[in-house]
Image: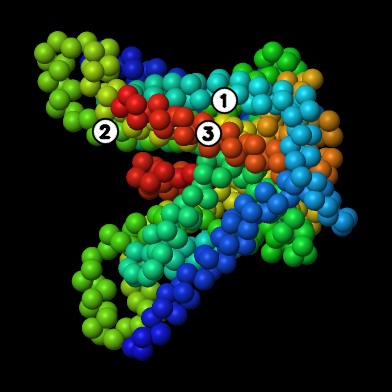
Amino acid sequence: MSRLREPLTVLAFLLPVLVLFGAFRFLPMLGAAGLSVTDYRPGGDVEFVGAENYAGLVEDRYFLASLRTTAIYVAIYVPLTVAVALGTALLLHSVPWGRGVFRAALFAPYVTSLVLSGVIWKWLFEPAGLLRNPSTVLPALAIVGVWKGFGYAMLILLAGIRTVPADCLEAAEVDGASVWQRFRHMLLPSLRPAIFFVVVVETIGAFQVFDLIYVMTTGGPARASYTLAYAVYQYGFTYFEVGKAAAAGLVLWAIVLLVSLTQRRAFERNP
Amino acid sequence: MRNRIWLTVLLAIVSLIAIAPFVLMVVVALTPRLSPTLPHAWPSSLTLDNFVQLLSTESFLRWTGNTVIYSSVSVVAVLLSASMAGYVFARKRFPGRDALLWSLLSTLMVPFHAVLMPSVVIIQLLGWADTYWGLIIPTLANAQAVLLLRQFIRALPDEVFDAARIDGAGNWRVYWTIVLPLCRPVLATLAVFVFLWHWNDFLWPLVVSGNGDTSTLTVGLSTLDAGHLTIPELMSAATVTGLPCLLVFLVVQRRLVSTVSFAGPGR
């Protein structure tokens, strides 16, 4: 084989992925930074406006409120997801039979779309009016999010529980360790990496909550569920302020990055 | 032992709560369109009329067709492109290989909303708004698929590749006659995941296709509302949207579950 042919073949194998990622992942990352300092409008002239879009975000009280709303949603959604996932994983681990059936039932909501979840639960919540009350709308949305999403965390945690040898747990039981003691001192320590992973993934996901809000509340009532991701969409596709939408998207990215780094440091500090 | 029975009962109750919304959806979808529905009244009779009505609606058929195209084309294209890249990432040495793999994976940390506007601008500049090209091609960049296949191909025994080399098989031949057949189990699982991601995808079809010719079921379903339709009609549309995913899941659930535990699904 000639010396030049091998590198060319390698390149040929990589080419589809390189083109796809170049044009539709990396180029948009640069494009986001570029758009955020312009006044781009579809079909219009483009002018450099410096930090004007960012200044516009800081002055927009709805945008500032959206940061708070998003944080509240994350603060409800993430602990609830981890609690439900951990509870169901422990139950699945300890039942003597029917595990496969229960697991399938619990995981089923995960394979359907958020739009479908939104449509069903909007109807289920209708009699109680939870989505029409500004103080209950975020918990209601979080419940739907947890129902739809906890299956993934449950499977990850279940895999973590399986790494604890069953005979160790049995030995501890024989030695008179209570259920709580076995959970606290045997399961929990070996589950820590899995819990950390789940918390990080779910936090990143929760900051981007969009589909449910689009379908169930469109940010209402009285902007009580107007989140950051929904603000990005509104700027871009309702008001056609593309630059401002790109800037808001970058703010979302920065927050997600900052939160995951903080979580990582917290985890490393007391492993 | 008594304890375990109580735990099983508890788990059964939680599992029922998890699937109850789907059961209610299907029951209401089968309720005659103008009769009172749950939670006010159990249906006095069941009917398939809502589905018949729905599946003779031009727009609903178009959404369904588009969703089938969006999901199936994406599955084939992602499996091919990702397995090609996975093969060289796993089996070839070339400068910058690890850096490249890491930079592909780093895109997983970027919220889609951060690149939403530039992606849409690129689609508009390409003239791909409301086309299958614009809908499908950008979603084929799938880092998890590349990673999963790379891991799997790396774990294949070296001897197979050595033997092929000695027999004088070139890279394309190795890829086509060795890598793809040996990867069949992981490709099958990945196909299911990619199918589910695209079938359920909402934001991208929303901004590329909107209500246009290439609109999908999720976007279509989000435009239907209880103001224009009765609840049984709405729920029958929801059922058609969700049923394929639930059926696929039931058929392959064991394999799907073990992959999640092994690699995580993501998106």
> At x 73% / y 15%, what residue is drawn?
A134
Amino acid identity at mark 2: Arg
Residue A41, labelled with which disc? none
Disc 3 from disc 2: Cα separation: 32 Å
Q: Earlier in the sequence, mark 2 or mark 1?
A: 1
With A183 as the anchor, is B45 left or right in this view?
A: right
Amino acid identity at mark 3: Leu
Write down the quadrant of residue A230 in the picture: top right
Disc 2 from disc 1: Cα separation: 28 Å
Q: Chain of mark 1?
A: A
> At x 38% / y 81%, what residue is drawn?
A6
The residue under label 3 is: A258
Disc 1 from disc 3: Cα separation: 14 Å
Amino acid identity at mark 1: Val
With B187 as the anchor, is B153 left or right in this view?
A: left
> At x 37% / y 28%, what residue is drawn?
A267
- Are discs 3 and 2 less than 8 Å apart at CB? no
Give coordinates of residue A137: x percent, y percent. Answer: 68, 19
Local packing at callout 2 (Cα closer than 10 Å; few below 14, some 14-19, many 20+) is few
Q: Earlier in the sequence, mark 1 or mark 3?
A: 1
Local packing at callout 3 (Cα closer than 10 Å; few below 14, some 14-19, many 20+) is few
Q: Chain of mark 3?
A: A
The residue under label 2 is: A162
Write down the quadrant of residue B202 in the picture: top right
- Kindly tell me whether residue A115 is visible in this rendering: no
Which secondary structure lies at badge 2?
Answer: helix
The residue under label 1 is: A74
